[in-house]
Image (cartoon, grey):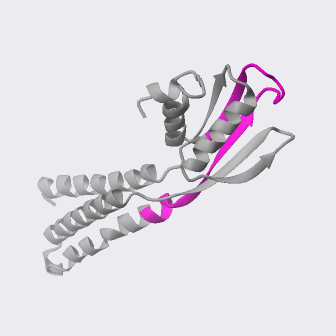
Amino acid sequence: MPSFQTSTLLLTALLAIGLVFFLRAASKDRTTVVDVASPRPPLEVLEGLSAWLVQRGWAPQGGDADRQVLRFQGRVAASPPLSVLLSFLGSIGAGSLGLVIRELQPSLGWWPLLLALLGPLAGVIYRQRADRIEAVEIRLMNEVDQTQGSTIRLRAHRDELIALELELAGPLDLASDGSLLSSPI
């Protein structure tokens, strides 16, 4: 096998591996825990957080009074543009693999190019994995009957926590260590 065919096959295999890892990363669970503090009373902060979550489409799922936990649940939908992009990239990659196979085995004719029809499968896999039910958990870390100051532990998807920190930092005087906003990922 000539070196150009070997290198082309290697690059095409790396393209396929990259697509698989991109699919995994795009639908990965990014649940994170962050502690926030506020000088406001706990009930005021909890009511503000609950109202904001309901406004964003999260449904209350009860909680645990003994552990001072509130739970919310919502369906997270897959991104249609990302699904189309992944289908397109999958088709290009599978078509490239078909061309490489055609070059290595000319006796197969143009049949290997039909591999490009498998490309939309990448978008379907992404949609199935990314479309899921997620939860937000709010846990009060200090006593409810305190009149000053509250510390709350939030467990949710990283993007939801970033939105919460950006939108509610002012109205509820929420403060965290800022790690969500400074992280490059």
Residue under the image location 35 percent in, 54 percent down:
17
- For this orientation, the residue located farthest to the right is 66
The picture places residue 54, in percent across and down from the top left corner, at: 60, 49
Task: Kindly indicate the quadrant of the structure image that contains residue 12.
Answer: bottom left
Height in image: 74 above or below 152?
below
Q: Is residue 137 magenta?
A: yes
Q: Nearer the viewer, residue 183 or 53?
A: 53
- Residue 103: quadrant of the picture: bottom left
Task: Identify the image quadrant of the C terminus.
Answer: top left
Q: Position of residue 156 (x, y in %)?
A: 60, 42
Image check: 10 left or right of 106?
Answer: right
**Residues in magenta, as a range:** 127-155
Q: Position of residue 102 (x, y in %)?
A: 16, 71
Question: Residue 161's spot in the image, x, y percent?
Answer: 55, 37
Q: Give the quarter of the figure containing the N terminus.
A: bottom left
The answer to which of 113 and 67 lies nearer the viewer is 67
Quick check: 131 left or right of 12?
right
Q: Which residue is at 14% across, 80% downward?
A: 109
How many marks the image carries: the answer is: 0
Left or right: 69 with respect to 101? Answer: right
Confirm whether the magenta stretch covers residue 68: no
Residue positioned 49% across, 41% down in the render = 159
Q: Which of 52 and 92 lies nearest the eye of the viewer? A: 52
